[in-house]
Image: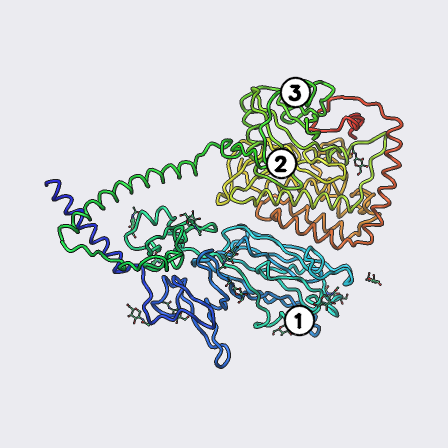
Amino acid sequence: MSMEARFLLLGLGFLLLLAAQHAPAVAIPGPECQTKCGGVDIPYPFGIGDNCSLSTGFNTSCQEVQPGVYRPFLGKYELLNISLVNGTLRELNHISTYCYNPSSRLMKPDIRSHDARLSPYRFSDVHNKFTVIGCNTLTYIKDRDSTAYQSGCVSTCQNLTDLTNGSCSGMGCCQTAIPKGMHYYEVGFDSGFNTSQIWNFSRCSYAVLMEAESFNFSTTYISTTKFNDTHTGRVPLVMDWAIRNGTMSLSCEEAKLNKTGTYACLSSNSGCVNSRNGPGYLCNCTKGYEGNPYLPDGCHDTDECKKSPCPSGGVTLSSAGGILFLAAIVAVLTRRWQRIVQKRLRKIYFRKNKGILLEQLISLDHNASDGTKIFSLNELEKATNNFDQTRVVGRGGHGTVYKGILTDQRVVAIKRSKVKESIEIEQFINEVAILSQINHRNVVKLHGCCLETEVPLLVYEFISNGTLYDLLQCEQNGILLPLSWEERLRIAVEVAGALAYLHSAASMAILHRDIKCMNILLNDSYTAKVSDFGASKSIPIDQTHLVTAVQGTFGYLDPEYYHTGQLNEKSDVYSFGVILLELLTRKKPIIENGNGERQNLSSFFFEELGKRPLDEVVDREILEEASEEAIMSMARLAEECLSLTREERPTMKDVELRLQMLRARQGVASRKRRDDEVTRRRKAVGANMINGAIPVAAASNHGSRWYSLEQEFVLSCVPR
Ligand SMILES: *[C@@H]1O[C@H](CO)[C@@H](O)[C@H](O)[C@H]1NC(C)=O
Ligand SMILES: *[C@@H]1O[C@H](CO)[C@@H](O)[C@H](O)[C@H]1NC(C)=O
Ligand SMILES: *[C@@H]1O[C@H](CO)[C@@H](O)[C@H](O)[C@H]1NC(C)=O
Ligand SMILES: *[C@@H]1O[C@H](CO)[C@@H](O)[C@H](O)[C@H]1NC(C)=O
Ligand SMILES: *[C@@H]1O[C@H](CO)[C@@H](O)[C@H](O)[C@H]1NC(C)=O
Ligand SMILES: *[C@@H]1O[C@H](CO)[C@@H](O)[C@H](O)[C@H]1NC(C)=O
Ligand SMILES: *[C@@H]1O[C@H](CO)[C@@H](O)[C@H](O)[C@H]1NC(C)=O
Ligand SMILES: *[C@@H]1O[C@H](CO)[C@@H](O)[C@H](O)[C@H]1NC(C)=O
Ligand SMILES: *[C@@H]1O[C@H](CO)[C@@H](O)[C@H](O)[C@H]1NC(C)=O
Ligand SMILES: *[C@@H]1O[C@H](CO)[C@@H](O)[C@H](O)[C@H]1NC(C)=O
Ligand SMILES: *[C@@H]1O[C@H](CO)[C@@H](O)[C@H](O)[C@H]1NC(C)=O
Ligand SMILES: *[C@@H]1O[C@H](CO)[C@@H](O)[C@H](O)[C@H]1NC(C)=O
């Protein structure tokens, strides 16, 4: 076949291709299609009725809601408006209610789930918040498969006079953000609270996913029943939409390559961008143009009036040969262009899948002021006085910890591995990779690292007040520091919150794998900070478990993990259950029982709990403050966490919410009274200590412990 003949054939093929594009596999709305309903514009790809929209997902209807009054609907939700530019729409979502019925004396939930699966929609994670109104409610929002996503919030009313208009932060009202990619949710109301006592001023709790901007809390919402209604109980919700089709969705790049029919950006002077929430893509007009990129010739020049009118699209060359020749050249160019795009695609995929971790994570982001920084060795030598031994504040776990003062006066903890084994280097880098992705007030903050040494040095915020282990176990001059029930609850909530956050972090669940009291640091206000991520692992969210070499600390180790080597987030839940018991009993995870045998704290605790009076099983100090009911609630929660089968253990989010609830019920007044008392007693103990303290920089044989120089007497702690 001659070259020309081949070009001709190619050209013909191309023309056919063009024809295919115009005899639309992608439907184009006819002129009979209505584009407005009830004052709301319905632009293509949306449409009203059959054959007017791009696909059934964009099919809307125009319904008469009152005589003469029409409103657009998308399924059962009334549409407020559609934005082509932002790829969003607003609709009215239904509020779920939980109301008290005085005659039956029962709470009755009316759950309105929202199902947008198999549709082009995702709930906007940017614009919406899960919003709850009520007194003493614990409300969940969860995905279909509740293991995939579950969150929630707690709202309490200690006293109606405490509530303020406009403030939605846990008193009478609470809000929580949702992750990207959600397309289904349902609501769950926790039935644990007996609401009969408050029904005279608050009959209903409400929960809904809604546009955060259009919500403003009013104290009157606590007592109103007006949201318990199918019409007035509706609020705006923002949906992100995109050109997508279930699991077969194409990305912008893929759709562009496969222009044989489904590419939706039909206008000249248009392009596509990947959806930022879920798979699929959106179309937009190129710079200098605006209009509807989904329609042929939908994008207009922004200053069109200045231009002379030009003939509308269509080939106007007269000679057929000319057409073919042109087509042939276009075809060749198209081929070449496709090859280039494909190459680029492969690169994109490669980077997406395999990119070098550190390069990606730290990516020399110097202008982000609180980003992870790369320190020079010089800087750190200066900060630690050449790693002077007097600056050592702890040894253990994965290295030695020095206290350092940077030139900007920031006090930092610098961690250096003592052994130069490649596995430890890996763990150090692992810790950098994991911590640099995290920003949570209860996770120790990584300021950066230094890569100029054989073993990298890690630079953290300095946490001054020792570990939870020390607080619980270490005697100072024969006295244990007092630790109130409220503070124990707060520490538990903080640690649970940090773990729940780690487990649900965006695309990767982060498993800590070595949760124990020694890895929980306390700052000067006793705020808990989870630390020591050397053993941690991240797993892609769609993977349910990892098989790894068993690592962790005896006494805290999930038995199922120990036996199978299979790791999932429930292993951390188990370890956390042990911490709850330590907070309840002030005992170590492995104890010696009366017969001199070593026994797990959990088996001891649950064996003795029924048999002996409570004050012989739990730490007496908490009995002064906590009700038996509260103690039993925490014990039951610990029991669930310590369940031998993982399925029976709650998620970390669940644990966090239940602890929050417990804390909220504890009551503001009693909390304050106790805190004052504890501060008073702690001051008394502290004064004793300082009088008799001799600074001893003895190395401890457990955990990484970071203390301030001023507090080195803590190291003289004698574990009981
Ligand atoms: C579009 O929606 C209308 C009203 O809900 C319905 O009658 C019609 O069958 C739908 N068309 C398609 C193609 O799904
Ligand atoms: C929609 O298109 C189909 C096939 O082209 C046609 O049979 C049907 O009558 C159309 N419906 C309307 C309401 O125009
Ligand atoms: C969307 O609709 C609301 C209420 O109908 C209106 O206040 C708002 O300005 C509209 N926004 C856009 C971008 O059209
Ligand atoms: C698009 O988003 C921007 C920024 O959020 C907003 O200001 C604008 O009103 C939105 N446009 C429409 C039509 O909703
Ligand atoms: C609520 O606060 C008011 C005013 O501060 C007070 O009089 C009332 O006793 C409080 N009620 C409860 C149950 O604490
Ligand atoms: C909050 O605002 C509503 C009116 O929107 C008013 O009735 C109520 O008294 C206000 N509550 C407080 C505590 O100011
Ligand atoms: C709730 O409390 C009321 C009185 O405080 C009591 O009569 C009722 O039995 C309780 N209901 C449940 C389910 O515990
Ligand atoms: C809430 O609505 C349901 C159904 O309309 C009704 O039966 C119930 O009495 C309402 N509850 C209250 C407290 O208004
Ligand atoms: C989505 O996929 C289904 C089958 O996989 C197909 O019938 C339908 O036409 C597709 N819709 C769009 C808009 O591509
Ligand atoms: C293009 O799309 C068709 C179906 O629409 C599919 O069979 C084919 O594999 C696609 N080609 C490429 C290169 O993705
Ligand atoms: C349109 O898409 C291009 C990428 O194709 C992007 O750079 C540009 O910001 C987008 N414009 C708008 C208005 O979204
Ligand atoms: C440790 O915490 C206690 C209680 O908050 C505080 O009084 C003390 O100053 C803290 N120690 C240091 C070194 O900050």
Task: Tell me which label, 3 or 2, sits earlier in the chain.
Answer: 3
Mark 2 residue crowding within 10 angstroms, few (<14) / some (14–19) / many (20+): many
Choose between 514 and 362: the one closer to the eye.
362
- Residue hosting label 3: 381
Q: Which amino acid type is marked by label 2?
A: Leu
Is 419 situated left or right of 718 in this image? left
Instruction: Confirm or deny contact between disc 2 and disc 1 (CB under 8 A).
Output: no
Quadrant position of residue 693? top right
Quadrant position of residue 104? bottom right
Q: Residue 492, image x and y in percent?
A: 70, 44
Q: Is mark 2 within 8 Å of ligand 12?
A: no
Q: Residue 633, image x and y in percent?
A: 72, 51
Mark 3 residue crowding within 10 angstroms, few (<14) / some (14–19) / many (20+): some
- Residue hosting label 1: 225
Task: Tell me which label, 1 or 3, sits earlier in the chain.
Answer: 1
Choose between 481 and 281: the one closer to the eye.
281
Q: Residue 406, image x and y in percent?
A: 68, 27
The quadrant the N terminus occupies is top left
Q: Which amino acid type is marked by label 3?
A: Glu
Q: Could you give the CA–CA distance between mark 3 and mark 2, rounded to whole angstroms? A: 38 Å
Q: Is mark 1 within 8 Å of ligand 8?
A: yes
Q: Secondary structure at mark 3?
A: helix
Q: Which residue is pictured at 72% across the width and 63% down the height? A: 194
- Residue hosting label 2: 557
Which residue, as the protein is rendered here, is positioned at the far bottom? 67
Q: Could you give the CA–CA distance between mark 1 and mark 3, rounded to whole angstroms? A: 65 Å
Q: Which amino acid type is marked by label 1?
A: Thr
Residue depth check, mark 2 versus mark 1: number of the one nearer the observer: 1
Q: Secondary structure at mark 2?
A: loop
Is 493 situated left or right of 429 in this image? right
